Image (tube, coloured by chain):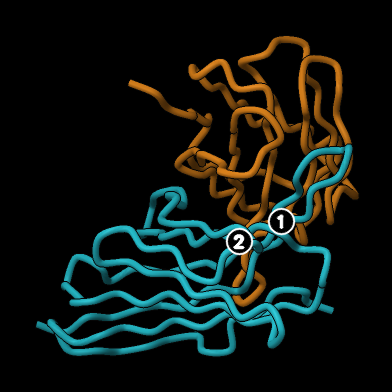
Amino acid sequence: EAQVTQNPRYLITVTGKKLTVTCSQNMNHEYMSWYRQDPGLGLRQIYYSMNVEVTDKGDVPEGYKVSRKEKRNFPLILESPSPNQTSLYFCASSRGQGRKQFFGPGTRLTVL
Amino acid sequence: DQQVKQNSPSLSVQEGRISILNCDYTNSMFDYFLWYKKYPAEGPTFLISISSIKDKNEDGRFTVFLNKSAKHLSLHIVPSQPGDSAVYFCAASAFNNAGNMLTFGGGTRLMVKP
């Protein structure tokens, strides 16, 4: 089954404790991206990657890092999480230039 | 400043009637538009899209209309069904060499009453 998976689905952590949210897709897509969803703001792009070792900032990259060492994986790293990063996070992938994107199920992160 | 806006946070319609969801954008460089549907505890799923060279695209019960001069698009669902109850996001894309960053609206919660 073609899918985008994210882990963990739920996470409660404390300020400053480094964490990684994993994202994996099995569709051999070149394009992957991370979004955060906040009430009334829709989904805002954090980072995206057009292929292995090619990443770039989206609209709200501050406080986040990503890496793309393999085509299928695109982890999101929060080196020092803060409460304003409490949000619902989605990973997405697509072929080519990234128009019709397929989304993972989401990761709900709470930073205390 | 939000480049893509959905001014109605919620919409309630009767089963069998038409649902019309609206979206406005400000960036004239957007050349591709999409609608996504989202159920609770799931990721958004692609519903329908339209290129800026068209003014209408239809897929079954779903039709998207694009008015470029007004920078406005709308999604029509006819007839509406209770299973259509979800949050609908409008998204816009501008192609450039760095790829396609999707810009989303804030979403409209559609409730279809039996």
Q: Position of residue B52 (x, y in %)?
A: 65, 63
Q: Residue at x 61, y 61 (%)?
A: B33
Q: Position of residue B103 (x, y in %)?
A: 71, 61
Asked whether the viewer can see residue B97, the reply is: yes
Q: Count the labels in the image.
A: 2
Q: Residue at x 80, y 39 (%)?
A: B99
Whether B51 is drawn above or below A71: the answer is: below
Whether A55 is drawn above or below B56: the answer is: above
- Find disc 2 in the rendering and name its residue: B33
Whether A81 is drawn above or below A53: the answer is: below
Quarter of image, res A43: bottom right
Q: Residue at x 60, y 73 (%)?
A: A39
Q: Residue at x 61, y 48 (%)?
A: A89
Asked whether the viewer can see residue A17, the reply is: no
Viewer-proximal residue among B27 and A1: B27
Q: Position of residue A41 (x, y in %)?
A: 67, 72
Q: Residues within 10 Å of mark 2 (few under 14, many from 20)?
A: many
- Find disc 1 in the rendering and name its residue: B93
Q: Quadrant of the C terminus of chain B?
A: bottom left
Q: Residue furthest left?
A: B114
Q: Amino acid at mark 1?
A: Ser
Horizontal relation, residue A74 to residue A53: left or right:
left
Q: Chain B hue?
A: cyan
Quarter of image, res B32: bottom right
Checking the image for residue A7, the label placed there is none
Horizontal relation, residue B49 to residue B2: left or right:
left
Chain identifier, colour orange:
A
Check whether the beta carbons of the residues at disc 1 and disc 2 lie within 8 A of each other: yes
